[in-house]
Image (cartoon, helix red, strand yellow):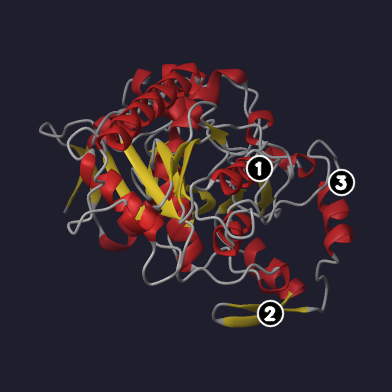
Amino acid sequence: MKLVGIAGSIADESYNRKLLTYVASHFTGALDIEILSISDVPMFSQDNDQTEGAPIQYLKRKIEEADGVIMATPEHNHTTTPALKNVIEWLSYKIHPLMNKPVLIIGASYHTQGSSRAQLSLRQILEAPGVGALVMPSDEFLLANVRTAFDEFGNLKDKRTIKFLDAVMGKFTKWVKVLNAMKDNEKKAAWEQEDLTASHPTDTTIDVPMDADDWVEQGATKTNAASGSDYVKLDRGLLTVDQLNWFLNTMPLELTYMDDNDQFIYYNNFLDHDEMLAPRYPKQVGSPMAACHPARAVDHVKQVIWALRNKQTDLIKMPVPGNKINEKYIMHCYHAMRSESGDFKGINEWVLDVWPTVKDYLANTGQMLVNDPNAKVDASASASVKPNAKPAADANASASVKEEAAQPAAAEKPDSGSSASVKS
């Protein structure tokens, strides 16, 4: 079982950090406990948002990857420390890694009451809306008279204290296991946890009804979005909104942006619905991904998004079933987008008929396509996600609703062009 420990003190010498270090050492072999530092966490301020900064993202990832959290709090004026409260402010502002996470509170204090009042304060904070931690509702571990509690090697000296700590940790590990067993997601394949309903707002989510036909217009009004001749500073360019639209709408491929909340928020609208390779309607923009696909495609969409979100791969490519050699070869490509710190920020999908390019190449080089008797069909055309393999989805895994039924690529009989070679 993987646990992380957080001491609520940033002092160079901390008895609560010493207690956590003992816990991690004492349970080596039975538990994997990693102690996280909070000394470089900045002061919380909405006016100086540092959610994407390395210290906050480090804590977020470590907590999310752990089965549970142990927090050791000192007592400052009958409450927990400003340092620990500050950390929880960051972890409940725009990110929520403690939500539904099992937490055990322990603490050490100079006096006989241990850190009882601080633990009560911390419990109330952790159970507040927006934090949503699942604090173990059982025995508290209060280490009193901490100045004399450890020997010269950092081990607890009192055998009864150690026995009680063993009992508390035993209950906590059972608590973690019970909570995990209660989660429906644990009974499913990992990719089934992907939520296509866009019900987990992120820092870029716009508070506009997702089923609104004029979602773009409402969102632009709400955010005072730039438009027309207003300039937008990009990573390596400065364009007006009009220029940006002209640029994207003259791309030789259809582009779609799904954000990290599984919400369809953009496509380059340069063709009418019936002329598109992956037909979309303007009113679909703003919809959750669950509303953009027929029911038969939902599982495959989840597989693709989950694989990209969880870094199984960064790019998934697949041909549309029914491609015919010498007529068309439509490809759907899905590329994960990530922030500078590596966090998933959505998917860039592009759809392109590559046959005109291949045809032009053959015409200009005097070559031709012939069947290769030794070619093997690419197994990645399967609609399933397998360990150590690139997953793929059926052709409906775009932000569009298609009229015709599409079968998973694995069920398609490959046409002769799918195993062709170029020969002079």
Q: Is residue 22 in sight in this rendering?
A: yes
- Circle 1 crowding by C-alpha within 10 Å: few under 14, some 14–19, many from 20: many
Pinpoint residue 398: horizontal percent, then vertical percent: 56, 38
The residue sitting at 24% across, 45% down in the picture is 157
Residue 270, located in which quarter of the rendered image? bottom right
Check disc 3 and give the amino acid type.
Answer: Asp
Q: Is residue 288 above or below residue 414?
A: below
- Disc on res. 239: 2
Give the mark, 3 or 1, whose residue is nearer the N terminus. Answer: 3
Residue 38, located in which quarter of the rendered image? bottom left
Pinpoint residue 400: horizontal percent, then vertical percent: 64, 36
Of badges 3 and 1, nearer the viewer stands 1
Q: Quick check: marks 2 and 3 in contact, CB under 8 Å?
A: no
**Quadrant into which the C terminus falls:** bottom left
Pinpoint residue 217: horizontal percent, then vertical percent: 87, 54
Check disc 2 and give the amino acid type.
Answer: Leu
Viewer-nearest residue: 70 or 284: 70
The residue sitting at 62% across, 38% down in the picture is 132
Q: CA distance from mark 3 to mark 1?
A: 15 Å
Check disc 1 and give the amino acid type.
Answer: Gln
Q: Which residue is denoted by mark 1 in the rendering?
A: 263
Give the mark, 1 or 2, whose residue is nearer the N terminus. Answer: 2
Viewer-nearest residue: 10 or 299: 10
Q: CA distance from mark 1 to mark 2?
A: 25 Å
